[in-house]
Image (cartoon, grey):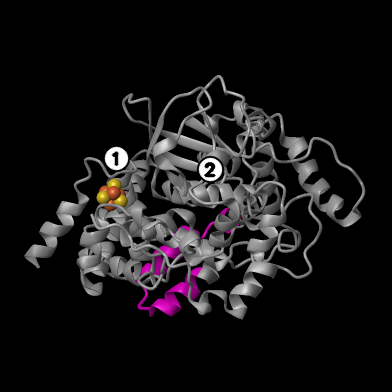
Amino acid sequence: MKPPPKSNGKVSSRINSFYAQWRLRHGWAFLLQELPVPPEKLLQVIWHHQRLLRDELKTVDGRRLRVLHPGFWNHEAGPDFQKAIVQFDGEAPQSGDVEIDMAPSGWRGHGHEKNPAYQKVLLHVVWEGAECNPRFPTLVLKPLLDAPIAELATWLTSEAAVGFPNALAGRCCAPLRGLGEEELLDLLRQAGLVRMFSKASQLQARARQAGWEQALWEGLFRALGFKHNVWPMLRLAELKPRLVPEKPRPGLLEIQARLLGAGGLLPKELTRTRSRTDHDVKTLWDIWWREREVYADCEMPKNLWRFAGLRPANHPERRLAAGAHWLAVNELPGRLQQWCTSKLSTTQAVQELEGSLQKDKDDFWSWHWTLRGKPMAKPQPLIGSTRVTDLAVNVILPWLWARAREGQNENLQETIEDRFLEWPAAEDNSVLKLARQRLLGSASEKLFKTSAPQQGLLQIVRDFCEHSDALCNNCRFPELVQQWWSKI
Ligand code: SF4
C-alpha cells in the first residue's frame, strides 16, 4: 500500500478561519476542555463511534478485549448500549449490554447492581479507576483514546459525532437503498398491513373467549398503558365485568374511583394542603373506601406501575380517568362501528375519531395531570391527538377489521385497510429512529408521512432484527429484498 504523503508542515489558512477560532475559543468544545473530567455524554459518543485504540483494548483484570459491535445506543432507562458483541481473550464472542460511567463506583452508586434491567451487562466502561467489578470486566477509556481528549471534544460537536456511524448500518441497508422510493414505500406498507392483521388476530382470539366488546376494552386499556404500564392497565380492563357491570351501571365518579382504587393508585391518607384538589380526591377516596371490601380481591399493589420517565400526559391516573369516561357512556363500540362504515375522507375520519375519544370534559382531570399535582394553567384534552393515532392503528382499526373478517365482509375489510394505509403518522420514537438509521441509513422521516410505513418498519424489526444480532448474523432479510427487487 502506498504510504500517505509526508506533511510539509503547512496547512490551509482556511482551517484557522475566524469562525473556526470562535468555535475553538468559545464554543461547546472549549467548555468541555475546561472541565476536570469529560462529561458522560462524551464517553458515550466515543464508545458509539469507537474512537479508541481498538487493537490495544485491555480490561482492568488484564484480559484482551475485541469489540465486534459496540451495541445500540439506548436513550431510555437501562444500560447505555444494548446488544453489543465483544470477545475476551480469544473466547467465543458474547452478546450483551455495556454500561458507561465515569468511575467503577458508578455501578453501585447509581443502583445498577439491584436493577434487573442491568442483568445483561457484560462490560463496564469507565473513564478512569482500577477497581474490578466482580460480575464482569471493566474497561478504562482514558489511556485508550485514538486522539487527545481536546481533539475529541471538538469532534463531538461535528455532524459525524452526532450521526449514526455508517459502520453500524445493517446488512439490509444497501439493498434497501437500491430500491426506488415507490418500491421501498410499497414494501413498508405491506409489512405495516401484516402488523395490522396480526393485531387483528390477537383481538379476535381474545374475542372468542371474552366477546368483542371486552376484547376492545382490553386492547384500548393496554394501549393507554403506553409501553411502561401495559400489564396493570390490561389487568384493570380484565376486571371490567366486575368493576363496571352492565346492571346496575355505575356513574363516572364511581368508575374512576373503582379503577384508581383497584389499581392501588388512590392515596392511603389525605393531606389538606390544597383544598380544591383535596376535595376532589376525597370524593373519589370516599367512594372507594365505601366499596373497598367488595373489591378487595381486585386490588393491585402500587408497585406494579412504573412512573419513572413518564411524561405527565401518560400518567396512568389520567389515562384511567379517560378510560372511565368511555366506560361511563358505554357507546364507544357502537360508535366505532358506525364510524368505519361512514364514507369519510382521512381528515374527516381522524376528526370524527378524535371527537369520539376526546368527547368529554372532566371537572378535575381536564385540569390535572395527576391526583396530587397542581392544577394546569389551561385545560388539556384527556386524550391527545398522538394517543388517538396510536389507538387507531394499534387497536381500533385492527378490531374493526377482525370483526369485518368474521362477518366475511370483504368490502369493509378493504375500506378499513385503506383507512389504515392513509392514517397520518404517529409520533416518532427511539425504536423507529434506530430502525431508520440501521435499515435505511438515514434518520430522515421523509418517507414516513403516514403510520403504515412506520408500522411496517417496526414489523421488520420484530420479524428479522429481533431474531438476529447486532452484526445481522443469519438474517435473511437482505437477500429477500434483493430477490424481490430483481423480480419487479
Ligand atoms: S438484522 Fe436483518 S433486518 Fe435487521 S438490520 Fe440486520 S440485515 Fe437488516
Say what secondary structure mark 1 lies in: helix
Q: Residue at x 27, y 58 (%)?
A: 173
Amino acid type of the residue that numbered disc 1 sits on in the rendered structure: His
Residue 177, picture quadrant:
bottom left
Residue ranking furthest to the front: 8
Circle on res. 175: none
State the image quarter where residue 257 is shown.
Answer: top right
User: Where residue 326 sits in the image (x, y, percent)?
Assistant: 57, 57
Residue at label 1? 467
| Residue range corresponding to the magenta coloring | 326-353
State which quarter of the image contains the N terminus: bottom left
Q: Is residue 289 magenta?
A: no
**Is residue 403 in view from this perspective?**
no
Q: CA distance from mark 2 to mark 1?
A: 21 Å
Rendered position, 10 above or below 66: below
Residue that numbered label 2 is attached to: 80
Which image quadrant is residue 447 in?
bottom left
The reply to whether the residue tagged 1 has its Cβ within 8 angstroms of ligand 1 is: yes
Please name the predominant secondary structure of the magenta segment in the image.
helix
Counting from the top left corner in percent of width and height, residue 150 is at 60, 56
Q: Disc 2 marks which amino acid?
A: Asp
Residue 113 lies, with reference to residue 464, above or below; the image says above
